[in-house]
Amino acid sequence: MTVDVQFDAEANVATCGGESLVFHCHYYNCALHKAIEDGMGPDAAAVLQSSAARVIERQIRALSAGRAEVEELFSTLGFGKLNLSSLNADGGEAVIHGSHYAMGWTALHGDRETPVCLFPAGFIQGAVSAMRDLPLDRIKVAESRCYAAGAGDCRFKVEVL
């Protein structure tokens, strides 16, 4: 399956699975991320992750997408190469090579002490929720290693409750 991103030229809107898409470069995404962190402090992480999870969960449900399609969508949207192959019924580990957010952050702001891939964590949470037909609050995702914090790739612990 090829991910079906549609563009309505009259309305100037791109959609996929009934959800609007906005394509931004790493400059914009990292500036927005930093502004939210600077403004909200510790509360920013939950807002950034949960907002992504809610949108992606609806999108993946509408697409009836499986693992391969979810990985393809992540890549098609320019977020990096997502690998969900080690997930099982209880969760497991998801890996991103070339994370748009982590690489963008380091290019603009240098390394950081904490993981930065909050949108990708939300993407994974929403996708697993939709693929398993479970509510979002039954899926927990936390980044355990991040390229922006000195790791070679970004890794996420996924728990199905």
Image (cartoon, rainbow, N blue to C red):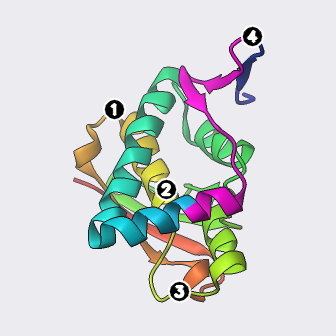
Q: Nearer the viewer, mark 1 or mark 2?
A: 2
Q: Are marks 4 and 3 in contact (CB under 8 Å)?
A: no
What residue is pinned by disc 4? Answer: 10
Which kind of residue does numbered mark 3 sit on? Arg
Secondary structure, mark 3, is loop
Q: CA distance from mark 1 to mark 4?
A: 35 Å
Q: Earlier in the sequence, mark 4 or mark 2?
A: 4
Segment colored magenta = 10-31
Q: CA distance from mark 1 to mark 2?
A: 21 Å
Q: Earlier in the sequence, mark 4 or mark 3?
A: 4
User: Mark 2 = which residue?
Assistant: 119
Measured in 3D between alpha carbons, the distance from the residue under mark 3 to the one under mark 1, in whole angstroms, is: 35 Å
User: Residue beneath label 3, please?
Assistant: 112
The disc, 3 or 1, on the residue closer to the chain's N-terminal end is: 3
> In this view of the protein, which residue sits in the foreground, 102 or 155?
102
Where residue 72 appears, as percent x and y from the top left, is 69, 42
Task: Answer yes or no: is residue 86 visible.
Answer: no
Q: Is residue 58 above or below residue 142?
A: above
Quarter of the image with the N terminus is: top right
Q: Residue at 62% x, 26% y: name it.
A: 16
Can I make out residue 157 in this image?
yes
Query: Mark 4 and mark 3: span between their CA atoms?
Result: 42 Å
Instruction: Tell me which residue sits at (29%, 42%) in the image.
Output: 136
- Mark 4 lies on a secondary structure that is loop
Ranked by sequence position, the earlier of labels 3 and 2 is 3
Query: What is the tally of numbered marks visible in this picture?
Result: 4
Report, in whole angstroms, how far the alpha carbon at label 4 lies from the one at label 2.
29 Å
Q: Residues within 10 Å of mark 3 (few under 14, many from 20)?
A: some
Q: Which residue is mark 1?
A: 133
Give the left or right position of residue 67, taking residue 44 as reference.
Answer: right
